Amino acid sequence: MEATLAEAGRAGSDSGLRADFDKLPRAPIRLIVFPQGKAINQGGILRLADAFRIERVDFLTEPDGVQDFAGAMGTFDWVPHRFVSPEIAFEDSRSDGHTLIALALEQTAVAMERFEWTFPVTIVVGSELDGVPKEWIDQCETSIAIPLFGLVTSLNVATAAGIAVYDATRAYRVQNPAFTPAREASARLLQ
């Protein structure tokens, strides 16, 4: 009997994957995440980073020091991440040759569907309530935004980051078709 995609995607189905996972190449995509105020987004963003096998997540330290990875669901040990200041996060990305892109709905933002991704790239994600602070948007090469079609004017931070990382990963795969999913079930979807 053939396994369903859901069964094939479970942790035990790809023999040896955990042992070799750290040897797989990562997409040259990073996230800089401003303090959330809703720390549960940290876990969701970490899970997102694992799902698309990106390089690293730089969380900017929450004012109250909270670290809440409840939503990470087993990805905590698999995703390079750290808590740093914005100065360190931005400088490290720049010195590693990354283009800094703010995910921010602002006057000069480019619609994500029209944005031409270049790599390596760092996507800067704002706080849940206030977005990316203007002084840090000004430090980015450009801003991108997700056009919304309903009444709401914004998305949850982890959701918006997910859309941006998916779009960046899709573009990276177009340029680098050898970058494939770690699990067989997802790799089959792209054949």
Image: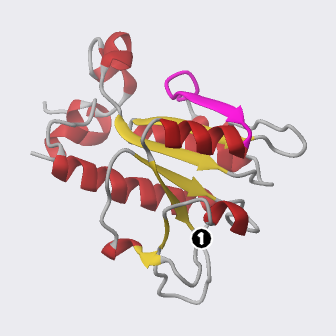
The answer to whether 3 appears left or right of 116 in the picture is left
| Residue visible at 71% across and 33% down in the picture | 83
Regarding residue 80, the answer to whether it shows in the image is: yes
Residue type indicated by callout 1:
Leu
Q: Main secondary structure of the magenta part?
A: loop
Using residue 117 as the reference point, say whether residue 128 is left or right of it: right
Residue at mark 1:
155
Q: Quadrant of the N terminus?
A: top left
Residue at image x 67%, y 60%?
136
User: Relative to residue 77, is residue 123 depicted above or below?
Assistant: below
Magenta range: 75-85
Is 62 situated above or below 23?
below
Residue 130 is a magenta residue: no
Residue 142, percent from left and from top: 48, 67
Furthest toward the front, the residue is 95
Write down the quadrant of residue 129 in the picture. bottom right
Graded by Cα atoms within 10 Å as few (under 14), some (14 to 19) or many (20 or more), the crowding at tag 1 reads few
**Which residue is at 59% across, 31% downward?**
81
Give the SS element for disc 1: loop
Image height check: is 11 above or below 112? above
Residue 102 locus on image (x, y percent): 55, 62
Q: Nearer the viewer, residue 111 or 17?
A: 111
